[in-house]
Image (cartoon, rainbow, N blue to C red):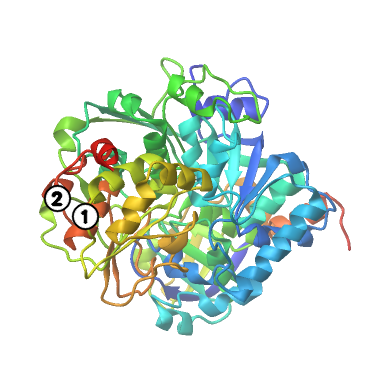
Amino acid sequence: MPMTIAEKILARASGKKEVKPDEIVVANIDIAMSHENADMARKSFLEIGVEKVWDPNKIVIIFDHRIPAESEKTATTHKAVREFVKAQGIPNFFDVGRGGICHQILPDHGYAWPGAVLVGTDSHTTTHGAFGAFATGIGATEMAGVWTEGKLWFKVPHTIRVEINGKLREDVSAKDVILYVIGKLSADGANYKAVEFCGTSVENMSVASRMVLTNLSMEMGAKVAFTPIDEKVKDYLAGRNVKGSPDWGLKADNGAHYERHLVIDAEKEISEPQVACPHAVDNVKPLSTLGKVKINQGVLGSCTNGRLEDLEVAARILQGKKIHPECRLIIIPASQEIYLEALEKKYIETFLRAGAIVNPPGCGPCLGIHQGVIAAGENCVSSTNRNFQGRMGSKDSNLYLASPAVVAASAITGYICFPKEIGGCEGEKKLSDAKMEA
Amino acid sequence: MKIKGRVIKVLGDNIDTDLIYPGRFLNITDKLETPKHLFEIAYPDLREKIRPGDILVAGANFGCGSSREQATAAVKYAGVGAVIARSFARIFYRNSINLGLPLIISQDAAGEIEEMDEVEIDLSGGRINDISKGKEISAISLPEQALELLEGGGLISTLRKKHKIHK
């Protein structure tokens, strides 16, 4: 029987020849990732009472939600997790200053590969479908169960195929594409389901951009999401010390069954940047219909959009410009590695000269903890992943989600705007020319 | 498995985990400490109303968003006996089963049941009896795996039994 990507991975991981949607299988776990909530998993693990984790080499712990510790309470949980890591002999631990956002660290350090089953105590674990992993979020107690047994039950999901074709306009990025898809399918349009993205627009995207599609698929409820496994993925993972055996030929069989097949003509349908308006990710509007929305803050970063290409487009737009006096701009590179590259390419200098502040690699204000929370009555445009009421601070604030280019441009004008209003995504001067002049 | 209780309604669809349990309190990793922040920012009145044994009735996609187990823990340890919704977000659903918080999906409950009604849920049978109205409301019975975990008191006690841990 022809199978989808999700079905193929679950069949292999559960030792079956084939599986069908709605069937319950018990799959072996290849990688089990936690961040700060490893402390909650640790407490559940102690309650279960087994002495040792099933396989320390398959457990990855990455601090990113509250780094460096913003309170004594967090410092205490960090310390408890460090002690647990040591006691259990877990080698894959990324402490403050040694890593960055978990969903950047996993692929960059070889913990995600085609065919892997990866679970994480973070909903945006779906990101790793860009590397062909069946990757999904679970809770802390369930993680304690994985640490105990190394396996987990799954209901085999139905799959939705999302085909996106056509060349994207200069000011339309992967973020605009996925916001458009979420607007179309709604916040629970893919609940419990797998999503397979395909089509020429997706094929032409960089791996970093494809990660935006799989990351935000969570915001329509997806259990897992995949983009094509091709040479680009192979190149990305080359030299990254992949911890498993990648199935480079992994793809859906011809004739695999899809519950739904959505076809999008990107050139026609996504002809301008998209914005998710308060307070729901599926409240998506084309930018031109927004009117003039004044903003007090811009945020560029997160597991959705904190990669080098995101910083690059922002640097082009901000080159030689100043942030609007009544607006702040917070920029967060997704990892130490990306931070260093951005430093070498002088993007960081551009940001600082423009009046932006650069946060350490981590989740920062995305979930309203620290490093840029917003007050009642304030508006923020952000490249992050959720705009739920109160997500970034006050319940009386408004959060708009947009692409890195729109965030950077809006920070200059002080209202949510098209990049073309301040010279386009290439900036008024090409960055490379500016560097030569310097 | 049957659960009886008084109904508190959570209005609207897509009640997300930030509304249930705000991100700023995620450094609380003790399950029993979580209820004090339940619905704290968005619906403080709702939190005040909940009494032990109450049954929440919600709309579609309840618990969408983050994987934070604190959201489920806050509901469970506030004493909520069960949650009925038109649908649940995937991770919230699994977290609830794992923590031993009974859930049931019903298309009609949010429309038919009123606040303060007394209801009885039959998890395995997939039925809700609105005792106050004398009316049966259809629901979807839980999958066997989920039911076993709930009947075993959640994942921790199920694994303790399985691995014969008595300490």
* Percent coordinates x, y for residue B153 in the rendering: 70, 61
Q: Is residue B148 above or below residue A215?
A: below
* Percent coordinates x, y for residue A230 in the rendering: 45, 20
* Percent coordinates x, y for residue A67 in the rendering: 55, 62
At a point 72% along the width and 41% down the height, the residue shown is A150
Chain holding disc 2? A
Q: Can residue A150 be seen in this view?
A: yes
Q: How far apart are the alpha carbons under marks 2 and 1?
A: 9 Å
Q: Which amino acid does label 2 sit on?
A: Ile
Residue A422 bears which disc, if any?
Answer: 2
Question: Which quarter of the figure has residue A162?
Answer: top left
Q: Can residue B126 be seen in this view?
A: no
Q: Which amino acid does label 1 sit on?
A: Lys
* Percent coordinates x, y for residue A347 in the rendering: 36, 47
Q: In which quarter of the image is the C terminus of chain A?
A: top left
Label 2 or label 1, whichever lies nearer to me, is 1
The residue indicated by pointer 1 is A321
Q: Is residue B167 left or right of residue A110?
A: right
Q: Is residue A109 above or below residue A302?
A: above
- Whether tag 2 and tag 1 are in contact, CB under 8 A, the answer is yes
Chain holding disc 1? A
Compare marks 2 and 1 and give the one earlier in the sequence: 1
As helix, strand or loop, the secondary structure at mark 1 comes to loop
